[in-house]
Image (spheres, helix red, strand yellow):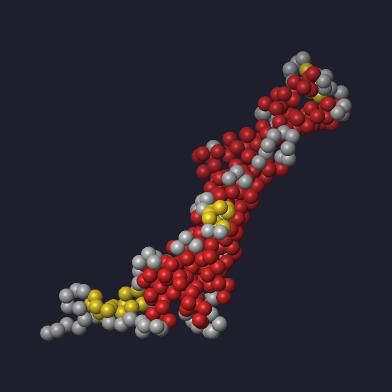
C-alpha cells in the first residue's frame, strides 16, 4: 500500500532574513525533496527569490542591480514587497562593500515601514555596520576608505536605543557604546553612558559591571589637586550605592574599600594644595581652616599627616604634655 507523503514547507535558511519567501517541497518515497512550487518568473516574489539566490551565490552586485531596477519601477506605488526589496538591497550592498549606501536602504525600511518584520531586522543590520565602524572600518570617499566611520557608528548605536527601547539589542548597544568610550579614554562620555545604562537597565546582569566602570571613570577623570574634584564626589556616592545594592560582593572583593581609600587620599591632597595656595597668597586664616577641615575629614591619609606638619610649622598646633595630643593654637 502506498503511503501518503507529507508536504513540507522549507523556509530558505538565509542568515540575513527570517522572513524570506517560502518554496514548497514534497518528501518522496526515496527520502529526497522535490520542488513542487516556485514563484512565477517575473513576479515580485520571483525577483525577491532571485535576489536572495544571487546573494547566496556571492553575486551581490547582480542582486543589487536587479533590486534597484525593481525598486525604481515600484517605489511610487503601494507595493507590500517594497520593505523586503529595500532590506535585501541593503544586504546586497553590504556584501558588495557598499555598507554606507546600504544604510540608506535600511533607513528607508525603518522610516517608512515600521509595522513590518523588516523594521527590527534593518535596525540589527545597521547595528552590525556600526560595530564595524567603531572597530576602525573607514567610510568610502570617492571610492577610497579614507574617512572615519566612528561618528556614523556612534550615531547609529544611539538610534538603536531610541528605536528599540527596552530591548535586548538596545541594552547591548548601550553597554557597547559605553565600553567604546572607555577604551578610547573619553572618560566623561563613558561615565555618562554607564550611568544611562544602569538607570535604564537596573536589573541587567551587567549593572554591577557598569557601576564599577562608572566609578573608575569618575576617579580617572581627576587630574590632580589643582583640577575640578567633582568626579571624586560622584564616585564616592556611587560606591555607597554599590555597597547598598551588592553588599556581599562588596565585602568579598574589597574593591570598594580600595577605591574609597584612593578617593579619600585624592580629596585630601586637593585640600592640602588649596591650603598651600592660601599661604602663598598671604591668607593664613583660610589656610588654617582648610587644613583643620582636612585633618578632621580625612584623618587616615598621607595628606592629613602633611597637613599636621604644616600646621605645626605655622604654630597653629600645640601639644598637650599629659596626653601628647595636638590642639589648635588660639
Toward the left, the furthest residue is 1
Q: How many marks?
A: 0
Q: Is residue 265 visible?
A: yes
Quadrant of residue 316 within the rendered picture: top right
Q: Nearer the viewer, residue 187 or 236?
A: 187
**Residue 168 point in image, percent of width and height:** 50, 61
**Residue 158 point in image, percent of width and height:** 59, 60
**Residue 138 point in image, percent of width and height:** 54, 54
Q: Nearer the viewer, residue 127 or 102?
A: 102
Q: Nearer the viewer, residue 6 or 143?
A: 143
Residue at 60 percent of width and 43 percent of height: 185
Q: Is residue 215 visible?
A: no
Left/right of residue 259 with respect to residue 26 in the rendered view: right
Residue at 75 percent of width and 29 percent of height: 272
Residue at 78 percent of width and 32 percent of height: 274
Q: Nearer the viewer, residue 92 or 114?
A: 92
Quadrant of residue 25 within the rendered picture: bottom left
Where, quadrant-wise, is the C terminus in this rendering?
top right
Residue at 53 percent of width and 40 percent of height: 251
User: In this picture, is 27 found above or below 296?
Assistant: below
Left/right of residue 50 with respect to residue 184 in the rendered view: left
Toward the top, the furthest residue is 321
Quadrant of residue 52 within the rendered picture: bottom left
User: In this picture, is 190 found above or below 168?
Assistant: above
**Residue 1 point in image, percent of width and height:** 12, 84
User: In this picture, is 206 found above or below 106?
Assistant: above
Left/right of residue 224 with respect to residue 193 in the rendered view: right
Amino acid at each position: 500500500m502506498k503511503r501518503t507523503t507529507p508536504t513540507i514547507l522549507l523556509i530558505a535558511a538565509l542568515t540575513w532574513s527570517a522572513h524570506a519567501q517560502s518554496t514548497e517541497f514534497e518528501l518522496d518515497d526515496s527520502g529526497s525533496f522535490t520542488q513542487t512550487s516556485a514563484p512565477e518568473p517575473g513576479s515580485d516574489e520571483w525577483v525577491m527569490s532571485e535576489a536572495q539566490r544571487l546573494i547566496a551565490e556571492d553575486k551581490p552586485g547582480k542582486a543589487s542591480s536587479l533590486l534597484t531596477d525593481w525598486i525604481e519601477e515600484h517605489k511610487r506605488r503601494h507595493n507590500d514587497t517594497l520593505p523586503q526589496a529595500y532590506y535585501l538591497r541593503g544586504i546586497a550592498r553590504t556584501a558588495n562593500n557598499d555598507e554606507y549606501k546600504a544604510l540608506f536602504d535600511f533607513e528607508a525600511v525603518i522610516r517608512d515601514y515600521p509595522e513590518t518584520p523588516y523594521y527590527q531586522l534593518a535596525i540589527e543590520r545597521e547595528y552590525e555596520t556600526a560595530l564595524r565602524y567603531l572597530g576602525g572600518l573607514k567610510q568610502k570617499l570617492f571610492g577610497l576608505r579614507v574617512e572615519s566611520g566612528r561618528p556614523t557608528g556612534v550615531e547609529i548605536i544611539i538610534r538603536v536605543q531610541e528605536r528599540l527601547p527596552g530591548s535586548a539589542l538596545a541594552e547591548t548597544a548601550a553597554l557597547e557604546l559605553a565600553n567604546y568610550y572607555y577604551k578610547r579614554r573619553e572618560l566623561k562620555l563613558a561615565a555618562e553612558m554607564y550611568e544611562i545604562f544602569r538607570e535604564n537597565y537596573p536589573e541587567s546582569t551587567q549593572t554591577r559591571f557598569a557601576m564599577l566602570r562608572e566609578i573608575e571613570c569618575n576617579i580617572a577623570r581627576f587630574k590632580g589637586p589643582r583640577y575640578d574634584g567633582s568626579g571624586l564626589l560622584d564616585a564616592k556616592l556611587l560606591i555607597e550605592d554599590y555597597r547598598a545594592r551588592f553588599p556581599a560582593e562588596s565585602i568579598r572583593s574589597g574593591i570598594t574599600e580600595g577605591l574609597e581609600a584612593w578617593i579619600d587620599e585624592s580629596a585630601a591632597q586637593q585640600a592640602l594644595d588649596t591650603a598651600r595656595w592660601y599661604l602663598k597668597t598671604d591668607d593664613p586664616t583660610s589656610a588654617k581652616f582648610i587644613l583643620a577641615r582636612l585633618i578632621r575629614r580625612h584623618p587616615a591619609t598621607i595628606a592629613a599627616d602633611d597637613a599636621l606638619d604644616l600646621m605645626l610649622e605655622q604654630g597653629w598646633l600645640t601639644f598637650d604634655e599629659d596626653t601628647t595630643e595636638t590642639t589648635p593654637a588660639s
